[in-house]
Image (cartoon, rainbow, N blue to C red):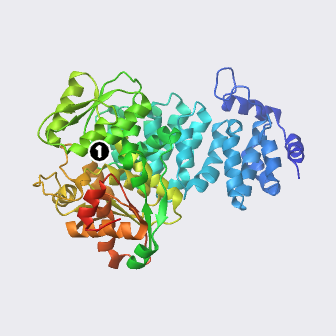
Amino acid sequence: MTAIEIQTVLASREDPVKAAHAQKFFKTGPGEYGEGDLFRGIRVPVLRQIARKFCRLPLSEALALLQSPFHEDRFVALCVLVHIYNAGRREDVFQAYLGYTRYVNNWDLVDTSAHKIVGPYLLKRVRRPLYTLAVSRSLWERRIAIMATYHFIRRNQFADTLALSEILLGDPHDLIHKAAGWMLREVGKRDEMLLSDFLDLHYRSMPRTMLRCAIEQLAKDRRQAYLKGTHVPALHREAAWQAYRAVMEADRRLRNYDLTTPILQSPVLGQETGGKAFLKLEHLQQTGSFKFRGALSRMTRLESSRVPITAASTGNHGLAMARALAETGHTGTIFLPETSEGQKVDALRATGVPLMIAGQDGVEAEQAARAAAAAQLGVFVSPYNDWDVLGGQGTIGLEMLSQLRRITHVFASVGGGGLIAGVAAAMKAHSPYVQVVGCSPEASAVMHESIRTGSIVQLPVKPTLSDGTAGGIEPGSITLPLCRQLVDTWITVTENEIASAMQRLYELHDFMVEGAAGVAVAGLLKMRTELAEAHCAVILCGGNIAPQFFISATEIDSF
């Protein structure tokens, strides 16, 4: 069987009258979206019948047919590609499809193929390709991105549809507005409250066509309220798809940087929990902690290198910001309190970034950094309360999904919540049943207590080995509602449990990690009786710890 044989069959079915009608219907005139396309005038049921007859066509011949100048030939080719995909050649067909998108060049061609090839292939994979397609200059690639999510919607996975629809709110083309509105409507059929959350945030700025399509299934009075602009939004509810969008956009911006860290199976920890345990080695990240991802994500978002940057940190965030500034060519100042420990100040000074001493503690240093940013019309970069920072940190979740075939539980230490919120958003979007466990030291469990009480609490500062998670949460934090929505289990650990976990990691894997990383391992061990047959991933968030301090903290005599 060959492409030429199929074209011969198609040529025998040509109808010039229907072809002329199709050319008008599919907008083939000068300047229109289908400009120059050619038609044979064959109806879709006949085309599908021909495709079924030739479904055993070799992939190479199907791709040859896809390059035909006739619209109907390309339609048949795509139907055949779907058959080949379902017959088992998933990787080959997916890669070929993305390589030949210039021939998938009208809305019916996209709509008959994207959710049957791209969607199924990405269902259990990281969905990076969709976010590349969504910002393409090609109208049809952008439509492929949103239409592919129909496969996810039918399996009650909605995050990509919502995140991509946000990206496409400003798209200039009506065909994208229709497609996004259609997919939003499909989400609403299955979860009307989720659609309402999206509309409440965006209905005033949504393209009219997108809005009309999205609300089509709602009650008449609600439709009218949205269209007239008289709808009163409900109190803002958690919107996990916003965090997920931040992660996927950060992932796209950071692809030119080598940020990938290994993941290592720990057989002994797996035996102790009755399942499998994997360690995400983020303590090997550049600057020694996960913070570099968030800092670099924020810096790559800035359009101008002339904007002055400020940050406040005595530790990992400061080191990450210094490196991110250097990587992206920005200039900035890091504010430190007068009480900063000498070794940390020396480490920051060695980066060459200007330091400013202000205030007696981290809170006062941050206030000074914010004030400086405001006075200079600059940007203050929070270590956690920033969508771009959170998105960068969440790329760890995407990496783990790529590195492991199965994950049932994720353990992460929690301070301000940026790490766990970003990771959880990525994990839940791809695998809703993953259990996310937030781990905090008993000596500083502000997020844990804030979730328990329903609002941000102030707790007395107590000494803890996990200085990376110590401290409060600022009012209006974006992470609190996300942690409330996305984190399944909260657990606190004692200082002895943290020290023991740090020591255990050194004995088993020769890893010298800081207290915040020990918190996550301690959480895993504390829950061990509940993890039989589980596949657990534990994020070792940082390794910036002086050997002397590690020795004294873990009571290890020598190395």
Out of 50 and 255, give the one closest to the viewer: 255
Q: Quadrant of residue 354?
A: top left
Q: Residue at x 25, y 70 (%)?
A: 497
Q: Is residue 395 shown above or below 530?
A: above
Residue 296 image point, x, y percent: 40, 38
- Side (left or right) of 361 relative to 19: left
Three-letter residue code for mark 1: Tyr
Residue 148 in sight: yes
Q: Residue at x 42, y 67 (%)?
A: 509
- Side (left or right) of 225 relative to 426: left
Q: Quadrant of residue 502?
A: bottom left
- Label count reads 1
Screen quadrant of the C terminus: bottom left
Residue 175 image point, x, y percent: 56, 34
Q: Residue at x 42, y 44 (%)?
A: 245
Residue 253 image point, x, y percent: 48, 38
Residue 90 image point, x, y percent: 68, 57
Name the secondary structure under disc 1. Answer: loop
Q: Which residue is mark 1?
A: 384
Residue 314 in sight: no
Out of 278 and 345, give the one closest to the viewer: 345
Q: Is residue 354 shown above or below 165?
A: above
